[in-house]
Amino acid sequence: MIEVKNLSFKYTDKLILENINFNIKKGDIVAILGENGSGKSTLLKLILSFLKPLKGEVLIENKNVNSYDKKALAKKIAYVPQSSSLPFSYTVLEVVLMARISYQSIFSTYSAKDKEIAIESLKQLEIQNLKHRFFSDLSGGQKQLVLIARALAQEAQVLIMDEPSSSLDYSNELMLLNQIKKLAKSGFTVIQTTHNPNHAFFVSSKTLLLKDKKVFAFGNSEDILTSKSINSLYNVEVELYESSEKIKFCIPKIHRT
């Protein structure tokens, strides 16, 4: 569904990504891990066509991402940023309805179908009770769920999330990860960046590791995420365990003096 071929990118004279290659099939849940500055967010922006590559290309359904017009691409890929601040007081329902812009002509207004789709997106994430609340009044976790609902209302096939749980407390982080897992089971293709290998263990079928501007490893999460690879990526020793639900997780080794 998505193929990244020989992709390189640089800001001015600084090379950020070099010769990146991988492909994502429909239904994959992909976690992208790497240190700060490894190019995770830049890679997402290249897939979204927010940036143009130095060389190489991103193909979506065998078509170069930069050859799509904005409305057509919005029907393929939806983006969930780390956070969002809106300049005016919008209700949750109004924020989610913004996703329907790609289905409107210039002078049209939201239809009954648009509103039905927006409310259904809120119901899917179990936050329909928030629809009349002001977005600015919500907690961090609630805002992230609303942004995901907005992405769902785009009716795109792929959800791209840039560190969706980075600013959340532990409770909201778990809530968000559970919702991502539900979306995966309902057939969405999801790409998310994260700093936490445990997030990849919990929700992702595949993992991409970025290091030194290149793909350090890519494949099934259980095969890619080993104590050795995590140590190489972050320069920290970890121990791997398996829960009673057969989900692996890692814990850093703490050395006491």
Image: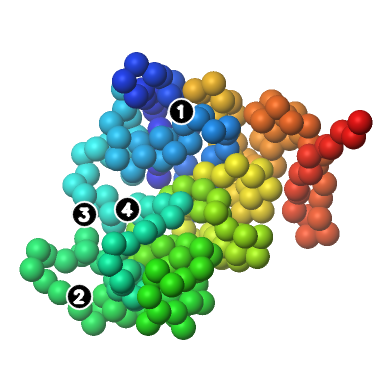
Of all residues, the one furthest to the left in this rendering is 107
What's the residue at 31%, 27% (across, down)?
A: 53
Q: Nearer the viewer, mark 3 or mark 2?
A: 2
Residue on which disc 3 sits: 71
In x, y percent, where is residue 121? 41, 73
Q: Earlier in the sequence, mark 4 or mark 1?
A: 1
What's the residue at 51%, 53% (across, down)?
A: 164
Q: Nearer the viewer, mark 4 or mark 3?
A: 3
* Residue count near mark 2 (Cα–Cα under 10 Å), binned few <14, some 14–19, many ≥20: few
Distance of label 4 from label 2 (alpha carbons): 20 Å
Residue on which disc 1 sits: 21
Distance of label 4 from label 3 (alpha carbons): 9 Å
Residue 256 found in image quarter: top right
Residue on which disc 2 sits: 110
Residue 26 appears in the picture as rendered? no
Q: Nearer the viewer, residue 98 or 181?
A: 98
In x, y percent, where is residue 92? 37, 74
197 displayed left or right of 69: right
What's the residue at 70%, 33% (across, down)?
A: 230
Kindly identify the amino acid type of the residue bearing the numbered disc 2. Answer: Tyr
SS type, badge 3: helix
* Residue count near mark 1 (Cα–Cα under 10 Å), binned few <14, some 14–19, many ≥20: some
Residue on which disc 4 sits: 76
What's the residue at 32%, 69% (across, down)?
A: 95
Q: Earlier in the sequence, mark 1 or mark 3?
A: 1
In x, y percent, where is residue 158? 41, 53
